[in-house]
Image (cartoon, coloured by chain):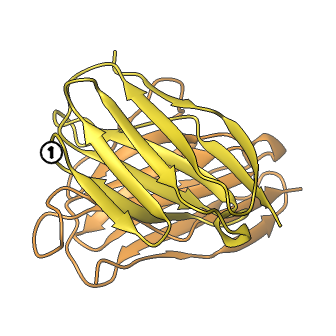
Chain colours: A orange, B yellow
């Protein structure tokens, strides 16, 4: 139980295009999902907190117009990197917070990550 | 501001040896998590520690939590090469459900 999927796992795109990354909780409902970015050899950096049915809360320094987050259902959140540039290349990881029915209330479960490369 | 400090940040050790990774945090919290990350992969949950004195063991790894000292340890017993990875601790912020992350400990175990 408590599986989170991400799609795609890897994407290469040209500069200026937009890329959408999906994060799904497969066997539990997640009112809150988190989007992280990880640079090589560094820890996770929280980008935003996504709450179902409301606007995402972005961390300081994260451009909300560049990283569009939508959390339309209790099992799906999407991150769209708009007008991507090479500096947006990174490993993006989502997590979903369990609210019930999993081993630990409020525990976060992580997706497998999406490797974005912008040429 | 809640800070989480891990040490060491890098550890190279021989197979068969024991070692401990430390995770200190700066404010009260009742939930601490340990994760493993292999190169190019996402995070794998290792342990969830929910109360003072909690101790959990899985194979050669054992984690403990002392909420009074604001310290968690991840102990590796008789290390094997397969345990080579980066290990992160994270502390739960009750107020907004965010996790505050340590910098990670890169562990290399040489055969």
Quarter location, residue B91: top left
Q: Is residue A73 positioned above or below A106 on the image?
A: below
Residue at numbered disc 1: B51
Identify the chain of the residue marked 1, using the numbered disc in the image.
Answer: B
Q: Quadrant of the N terminus of chain A?
A: bottom left
Coordinates of residue A55 in the picture (x, y in percent)? 28, 45
Residue in the image at 45% along x and 48% along y = B74
Q: In this orientation, which residue lies closer to the viewer: B29 or A70?
A: B29
Q: In this orientation, which residue lies closer to the viewer: A39 or B89?
A: B89
Query: Is residue A63 found left or right of A35 in the rendered image?
Result: right
Q: Is residue A95 positioned above or below B32 on the image?
A: below
Residue in the image at 63% along x and 33% along y = B8
Q: Is residue B47 visible?
A: yes
Provide the secondary structure element on which disc 1 rests. Answer: loop
Query: Is residue B90 found left or right of A38 in the rendered image?
Result: left
Coordinates of residue B52 in the picture (x, y in percent)? 16, 40
Q: In this orientation, which residue lies closer to the viewer: A23 or A14?
A: A23
């Amino acid at each position: 139980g408590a599986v989170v999927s991400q799609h795609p796992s890897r994407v290469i795109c040209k500069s200026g295009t937009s890329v959408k990354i999906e994060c799904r909780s497969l066997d539990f409902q997640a009112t809150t999902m988190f989007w992280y970015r990880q640079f090589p050899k560094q820890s996770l950096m929280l980008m935003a907190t996504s709450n179902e049915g409301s606007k995402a809360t972005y961390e300081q320094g994260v451009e909300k117009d560049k990283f569009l987050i939508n959390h339309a259902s209790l099992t799906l959140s999407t991150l769209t990197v708009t007008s991507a540039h090479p500096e947006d290349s990174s490993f993006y990881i989502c997590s979903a917070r369990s609210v019930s029915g999993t081993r630990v209330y409020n525990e976060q479960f992580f997706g497998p990550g999406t490797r974005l490369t912008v040429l | 501001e809640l800070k989480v400090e891990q040490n060491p940040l890098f550890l190279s050790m021989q197979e068969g040896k024991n070692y401990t990774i430390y995770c200190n945090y700066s404010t009260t919290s009742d939930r601490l998590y340990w994760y493993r990350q292999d190169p190019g992969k996402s995070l794998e949950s290792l342990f969830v520690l929910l109360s003072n004195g909690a101790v959990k063991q899985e194979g050669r790894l054992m984690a403990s939590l002392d909420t009074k000292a604001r310290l968690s340890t991840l102990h590796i017993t008789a290390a094997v090469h397969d345990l080579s990875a980066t290990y992160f601790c994270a502390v739960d912020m009750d107020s907004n459900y965010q996790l505050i992350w340590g910098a990670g400990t890169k562990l290399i175990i040489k055969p």
